Amino acid sequence: MKLSVVIPLLNEEAHLERTLEAIRRELAAFEGDYELVLIDDGSSDGTWKLLQASANEAGDVRAIRLSRRFGKELAMCAGLERARGDAVIVMDGDLQHPPRLIPEMVRCWEEEGFDIVEGVKRRRGEESASYRTQAGVYHFLLRALSGIDLRGASDFKLMDRKVLEAWNRMPERSVFFRGMSAWLGFKRKRLPFDVEPRAGGKTAWSALGLIRLAINGITSFSSLPVHIITMMGAVFLCFALVLGVDSLMQWFRGEAVTGFTTVNLLLLIIGSMLMIGLGIIGEYISKIYDEVKGRPRYVISEIAEPRNAGAESASRS
């Protein structure tokens, strides 16, 4: 029985060896073979050189280098599609997902028969109050619009082979791992954990990147924003009818006056709503555009495997 650990990496040179050591220490008690599938998502430091050296020296590392930075979600796809284990664990490479939880995940899978064992954030770690507020608003909107509750959810998961095969049959180019894995269903268990301090460096997530992730998550699992536009249009139509009737009555009574303020406010409100509506529709159209193009989700530049398994270079989707 083989266990695969998939880890996307971006500029993790400073703490990569410490991360691998901590994970191997927890996997030492695993009764079966395991592999570390490490994906370099276009790092600009020496991460790939360390991965090559680790693949040559250790027999448990398979390293994949993407041709450029495609993003964490697509880097995870590259690892999941090449994982060979009966179960797969996905985790970050900065030790914020505690490796000490791995044995309990494996036990829940082996002994209790759960198909998915997911780590749930009990404490979010060193995050600012504004970031926590933004995360809370996002999870509220996602839950309200799509019915999917991802409060406390993380990418730290163990998935059985049948779950992985179901995941690999989802061909979307716009990938939202947490939401898509929740959509799959299956028998699952939640394990709470406290987010640890980063092993080194700063997070690669910018405010703009987090906003894009939030928009992607909402639009990937709900078409309700588009329907809201229709409902708002109906509300404004009713408002316009009432205002029109009132204006006609004033005109018949000879009380009609020029209302520049009212006209200006109406123009501003209606114009703003139209622009917001077009933006929401455009977001869905852009997703259709990306899917129709049919480009590969990622491109692989190099693959480094243990010497007994050989080494190869390829470009695949």
Image (tube, rainbow, N blue to C red):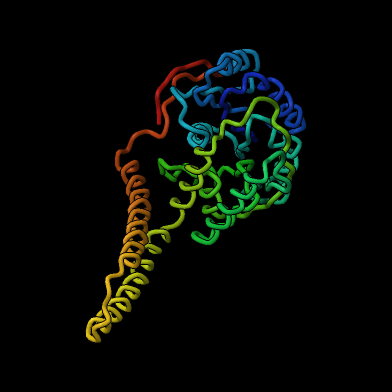
Q: Position of residue 207 (x, y in %)?
A: 54, 38
Q: Residue at x 57, y 13 (%)?
A: 49
Residue 273, position in %: x, y? 36, 59
Residue sitting farthest toward the bottom: 253
Q: Give coordinates of residue 113: x percent, y percent.
A: 67, 51
Q: Can you see residue 82?
A: no
* Horizontal arrangement in the rendering, residue 235 relative to residue 7 (left or right): left
Q: Judge from the rendering whether residue 259 lies leftward or rightward of residue 213; answer left or right.
A: left
| Camera-nearest residue between 160 and 68 | 68
Residue 216: % across, % down: 46, 46
Q: Nearer the viewer, residue 58 or 231?
A: 231
Could you say which quadrant of the image residue 34 lies in? top right
Depth check, front residue: 267 or 170: 267
- Can you tell which quarter of the image residue 137 is in? bottom right
Q: Is residue 36 above or below residue 222?
A: above
Q: Who's the residue at 50% across and 16% down the image?
A: 311
- Residue shown at the point (46%, 30%) measured from the top left: 70
Q: Is residue 120 above or below residue 224?
A: above
Q: Quadrant of the N terminus?
A: top right
**Looking at the picture, does residue 117 appear above or below residue 266?**
above
Q: Residue at x 53, y 56 (%)?
A: 142
